[in-house]
Image: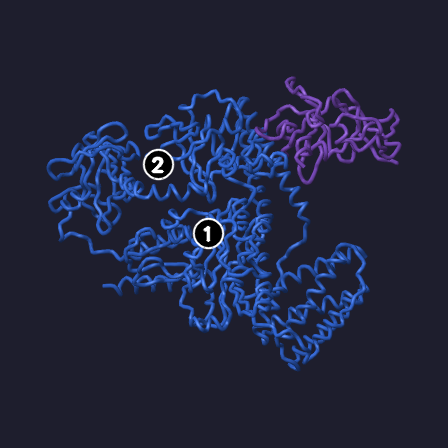
Amino acid sequence: MDDLIADFVAECREMLEALGGEIVAWEAQPDDRARLDSIFRFVHTVKGNCGFFDFPRLEALSHAAEDALADVRANRRHADPVLVSAVLAIIDRIGEMVSTIEAGEELPAGDDSALIHALEPGAEGAAAPVAVAVMDGTIKSSAAPRTIRLSVELLDRVMSTVSDMVLARNELARRLRESTSDVPIDGAFERLSSIIAEMRDAITRTRMQRIENLFVGLPRMVRDLCAELGKQVLVDIEGGDVELDREMIEMIRDPLTHIIRNAVDHGIEKPADRLKAGKREIGLLAVSARQSGNQILIDIQDDGRGIDGMKLVEKAIANGVIAKDNAAQLSHRDQLALIFEAGLSTAKEVTAISGRGVGMDVVRSNIERIGGIVEVDSKVGDGTRMTLRVPLTLTIIPALTVSIAGQHFAIPRSAIEEIVRANGESVTLEHLGGAGVATIRGRRVPEVSLASILGLESQIAEQDRTLIVLRPAGGDVYALSVDRIHDHEELVVKPAAPAVMATGLYAGTTLADDGSPILLMDPAGIAEVGGVRLEAQERASRIVEAPVAAIEEDVAVLLFHGLDGGRRAMRLAVVDRIEEVPATAIRPGAGQLRVQIGDAILPLAGVNGDLPAEKVRLFRLNDGTCEIGYAFREVIDLSAIAHEVIPAEHPAEVSAVSLVAGEPAELVDPHWLFATLLTAAERTPEQPVCRLPAGDPWMQNMLRPMVEAAGYRVVSETDEFEVDLAILSAATESPRSPAARVIRLRSEPDPASAKDDTIYRYDRAALLTALKSSATGRR
Amino acid sequence: MSELLLIVTIDGERVALPAAAVESVVELDTLIPVPRAAAHVAGLSALRSRVLTVIDCMRSLELGDTDCSDGIREAAVVELEGHHYALIVDLVEDVVEALSDPLPVRAAMGSGWERASQGMVETESGPLLLIDVAALIAGGEAKAAA
């Protein structure tokens, strides 16, 4: 019997969870038969089971709801908001009772007649506002996937066993390396290794859950909020099929709820105000999730009144969060970021829903605790967009292992900006009143010694240590000096015991390959214990930095040996890529040397010595429209010009000399090269230019080759000139920089609506047509 | 009264731990210190793929330091709120059955013992002090702060 009840409870749970979104969607479209049916199925199942188990209260409730819904199904009654609210109330009550049964307690006697009465036609109910939910794609109803239910503990046990197995394998690998090698044994071991790796992958995937589980409750929540606030909101949910670590989903549940509550409460205006502002009565709240690399991006966008940056600033000054002189220098972004400061809320009055002072600062700290970032963008009158970026999984973190006085520690790689030697050329280390200040290529950053923070004796002199430049989530950079850098590793991180976490220095523990424990440092914690002021510093230093950065930016050069052996430097920005061609591809033609690369014939420069017999390496230089080749012998290094530049007397291939990496080098003048080698007549017909989002791997890897094959030159978002075509995913808003034409790609095969002009991203024929028409349209 | 007790020696004194709380008894060899953690946290160690937080019972009971220099130490592994701890003891003796409920000790004990003990239990080998594992893990400093 107990087993049966457990099954019943589990079944109810599952159905209840799935139902939350359905019932609100049904309210929006009372004619939607499929949704009505699934709600009906639920109450029907509950009713059937209750009779069997003898839960009279549950039975009466579900029976009443079933009757009402049956009437709707038979078209004897219309599903109005009052009825939906009543059905919702009953389903809630059923949920409560199921929890009671699950806890093994007796169902208390209670009176449900009010709820049942509310179902009757013409019953008085709170006039419920309309909250509409549009789930993305089609709702998958029938054809349940073949699954079994497993307890999470069992999965965790399997996971930890697999981790043990990986450690045992590593141990075995070390022993095998030490002993004499035996080919058959090595082969068998290799096989075992790959099987274990595969198994680890698979078991990691079992921990992944669709983010739908998190989203499914949102329409219901927004609906209830709307009822309370007298607003109308349409919820648009997209990307529910993105998978995320189970624990991660739990961690972002509260922040997400908070942001959505804020959006409905403070963002979206009342219907009357919206009409006055010339907007539709119904507000739009779009929640979408997508994966980008090993991060998940969750966007929450509303079309409400937006955040007034100036008001935030005024409030921040009033509360003493920022000084008045600094306030004037804040960019729009910085102004908005103030919303994450503790104790700032733009809401005029505190409401029951949000604005109780526990605000966005808590959201930010919660997201940052799991290694994520919150970003905000808003335009007054137009709405607000919040973006949560969270790592795919909590448990595996790429990290750098370092050591202090022989003890190993790990530092999460996501926080590391760069690593420099303390005695490096462009680095100086000073002490001002006991505090360390490192100057790295002209930028001053506070320096903290990990050894002194941890109270360990370092055997290595200060100038021989390595500086790790860290940028903790939300904070500003500082340099951490460590004795030695060891390795990049993917570490399986586990939370540490409270006594260890209490230090505030560590983010968790992990095991090294040899099975010994390693502490994972928390970069923000180190900064705090080390006394680095993050927030205040962040703003101050950025203002000072900006002009310096602008100068620094354009001096990155590629140092190389020319064919004549000369030491030269080429500005990195003009080098498109490095090619290697057979010597036979280079031949004179039409009065100058030319090189054939694929289908293109480019003018060739830099041939001031003997060409190598077989392979010639060359830079492919690009000025935005044309390309030329520049032959060289070998690349020495990437470097920067930090010294005085002495210009040449006459314009020529070499425009100047300067000290690069400690030795003089000739600076190649790309302008002269292009001006000399290209005569107007032989400029290649200008290619159409297409802009693709740089951070989107699908666009870059899958789409880009196709776009290039269609004759386009591809640029990223960082080039802001007008392009002929911009390709975007349907989820992003209008392009940031001008484009003559925009193609939007959606990830679902079917268009969301008739006037949807997006193209399905695997619809090759339609894509090619669109590419072709944009290319010809401009000529 | 059938509760089982694990008899261990801490600072030369035989005391009882509730056997149900003890997962296993291990010999620790490696010990990775945790800089800046509370004094009674001796460090971290690994048991298979689990990280153990090693608690120095003597320091937790304000009895001085355990000498860890000689390498291998015996420890009882317990789980508390999802974390695994290894309690360093001098010696693990035996498992016995408790013959009585814990009774208050009416004589004055050392303050550390006072804090960590749940009372005195009768066993076949005489009365023993029953130790509260959670108090042992919390250590003296946490208590002082609270």
Instruction: From the image, tell me which residue sits under label 1.
Output: A318
Taking depth in this image into account, of A8 and A257 the one nearest to the observer is A257
State whether residue A10 is above or below residue A167. below
**Residue A120: % across, % down:** 70, 78
Q: Quadrant of residue A444?
A: top left
Chain letter for the purple colouring in the rendering:
B
> Which residue corresponds to the image point at 36% horizontal and 33% vertical from the top-left?
A440
Q: Quadrant of residue B76?
A: top right
> Which residue corresponds to the image point at 66% horizontal and 75% vertical from the top-left?
A125
Which color scheme did the rendering employ for the protein?
by chain
Q: Residue furthest top?
A: B70
State whether residue A26 is above or below residue A267. below
Residue type beneath disc 1: Ala
> Which residue corresponds to the image point at 54% horizontal and 22% vertical from the top-left?
A178
Badge 2: few (under 14), some or many (20 or more) residues near its Cα, within 10 Å? some
**Does residue A596 appear left or right of residue A367 in this picture?**
left
**Tag 1 subunit:** A
**Residue A510: % across, % down:** 57, 35
Instruction: From the image, tell me which residue sits under label 2.
Output: A443
* Quarter of the C terminus of chain B within the rendering: top right
**Residue B86: % across, % down:** 68, 30
Chain letter for the blue colouring in the rendering:
A
Q: Are marks 2 and 1 in contact (CB under 8 Å)?
A: no
Taking depth in this image into account, of A544 and B101 the one nearest to the observer is A544
Q: Is residue A612 visible?
A: no
**Does residue A733 appear left or right of residue A595 in this picture?**
right
